[in-house]
Image: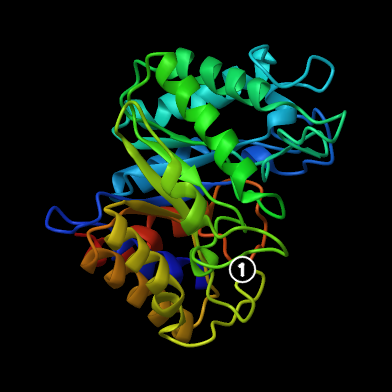
């Protein structure tokens, strides 16, 4: 029942027409599961969405879904990162995208690779095995070319780059942005930073010798003028999202504060595309305070909770709806009074 209770808390805070936030939704994290098993088997080691449960979210006001994919499955190492896709994997992925966007939702395309490909940092010129920045741009050009006519698609450049030069994160981000725009796509792009793209570390070095995101990413340029910074934040003791206890009811807003001030000072916008917490009243209050904070600060345009999607089992942050009688009775009865 705890999943139902947390979803009630979450869905009751979906954006209204008067809110500063335009997007409220969930992460569909099943497409990048079991990355150690390549290529994997659809429905066994990975699966993008459960269509019934996704329709439930759509029916109850969720308007954006961040769908994860694995680069090594989309672009197998035998052919390399770039414009040559494994079409069966792409078809499975785009079927999920089209289901959501045809149903009125938006989709964030999320390569869930931490700015790595086949074990190496993308663009690392000192690693002979690393995919190049140009290959990364080719991948994004191909994705954008195939989806440029779907206005409900959002391009999330990369999930959580970390432990690499922030200047290389910038270089890869800029190459992806240029490639997306060159393909003719004009939709929103979400640009990540270094340090797991964590909001709390945005204005300070996230690793030894790293330049803060706040000093490097001001150089980014988008020819389409439709970009937001992609930030993540968790509320447990080390900010990792691996503990089911939150530090306090205010820790989320405290960890978002400096990044928000940076956004204000520079006239930028951001999207909180990953956050999550345990199923207890302290964490419910923390999440509530965070979403109130986003609504009160116009720099934040959206959020997506981690995580929904199939194959999570008893993962403590999963809010994937139950099946069976609870799905058709307890869920709607519990959630509908909280919807905007």
Q: Given the current orientation, which residue lies at the most extreme left position?
A: 18
Residue 99 position (above or below residue 253) = above
User: What x and y, as percent, mark residue 138?
Assistant: 60, 17
Tell whether 123 sits left or right of 260: right
Q: Quadrant of residue 76?
A: top right
Of residues 300 and 106, the one nearer the viewer is 300
Q: How many marks?
A: 1
Query: Local crowd at mark 1 within 10 Å, few (<14), some, or many (≥20)?
Result: many
Question: In this figure, which colouring scheme has been used for the structure?
Answer: rainbow
Of residues 190 and 240, the one nearer the viewer is 190
Tell whether 87 sits left or right of 336: right
User: What x and y, as percent, mark residue 36?
Assistant: 84, 41
Residue 252 position (above or below residue 183) = below
Look at the image and tell me whether residue 54 can be seen: yes
Tell whether 41 sits left or right of 221: right
Residue drawn at point x = 39 percent, y = 64 percent: 330
Tell whether 303 sits left or right of 246: left
Per the image, the residue denoted by label 1 is: 241
Residue drawn at point x = 51 percent, y = 65 percent: 233
User: What x and y, as percent, mark residue 288?
Assistant: 34, 74
Look at the image and tell me whether residue 333 can be seen: no
Residue drawn at point x = 67 percent, y = 70 percent: 242
Of residues 326 and 265, the one nearer the viewer is 265
Residue drawn at point x = 64 percent, y = 41 percent: 168
Residue 67 position (above or below residue 142) = below
SS of the residue at dot 1?
A: loop
């Amino acid at each position: 029942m705890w999943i139902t209770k947390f979803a009630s808390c979450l869905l009751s805070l979906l954006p209204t027409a008067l809110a500063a936030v335009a997007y409220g939704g969930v992460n569909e994290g099943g497409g990048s599961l079991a990355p150690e098993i390549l290529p994997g088997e659809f429905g066994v080691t990975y699966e993008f969405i459960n269509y019934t449960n996704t329709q439930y979210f759509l029916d109850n006001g969720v308007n954006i879904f961040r769908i994860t994919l694995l680069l090594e499955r989309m672009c197998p190492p035998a052919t390399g990162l770039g414009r040559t896709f494994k079409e069966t994997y792409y078809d499975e992925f785009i079927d999920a995208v089209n289901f959501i966007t045809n149903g009125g939702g938006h989709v964030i395309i999320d390569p869930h690779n931490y700015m790595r490909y086949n074990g190496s940092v993308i663009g690392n010129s000192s690693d002979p095995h690393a995919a190049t920045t140009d290959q990364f741009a080719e991948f994004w050009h191909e994705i954008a070319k195939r989806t440029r006519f779907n206005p409900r698609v959002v391009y999330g450049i990369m999930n959580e780059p970390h432990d690499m030069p922030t200047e290389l994160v910038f270089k890869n981000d800029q190459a992806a942005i240029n490639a997306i725009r060159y393909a003719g796509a004009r939709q929103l792009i979400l640009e990540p930073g270094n340090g797991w793209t964590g909001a709390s570390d945005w204005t300070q070095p996230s690793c030894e010798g790293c330049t803060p995101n706040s000093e490097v990413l001001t150089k980014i340029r988008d020819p389409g003028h439709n970009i937001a910074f992609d930030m993540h934040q968790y509320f447990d003791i080390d900010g990792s999202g691996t503990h089911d206890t939150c530090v306090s009811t205010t820790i989320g807003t405290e960890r978002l504060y400096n990044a928000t001030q940076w956004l204000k000072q520079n006239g930028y916008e951001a999207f909180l595309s990953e956050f999550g917490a345990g199923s207890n009243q302290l964490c419910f209050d923390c999440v509530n305070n965070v979403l109130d904070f986003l609504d009160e600060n116009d720099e934040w345009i959206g959020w997506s909770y981690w995580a929904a999607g199939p194959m999570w089992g008893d993962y403590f942050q999963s809010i994937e709806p139950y099946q069976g009688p609870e799905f058709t009775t307890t869920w709607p009865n519990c959630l509908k009074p909280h919807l905007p």
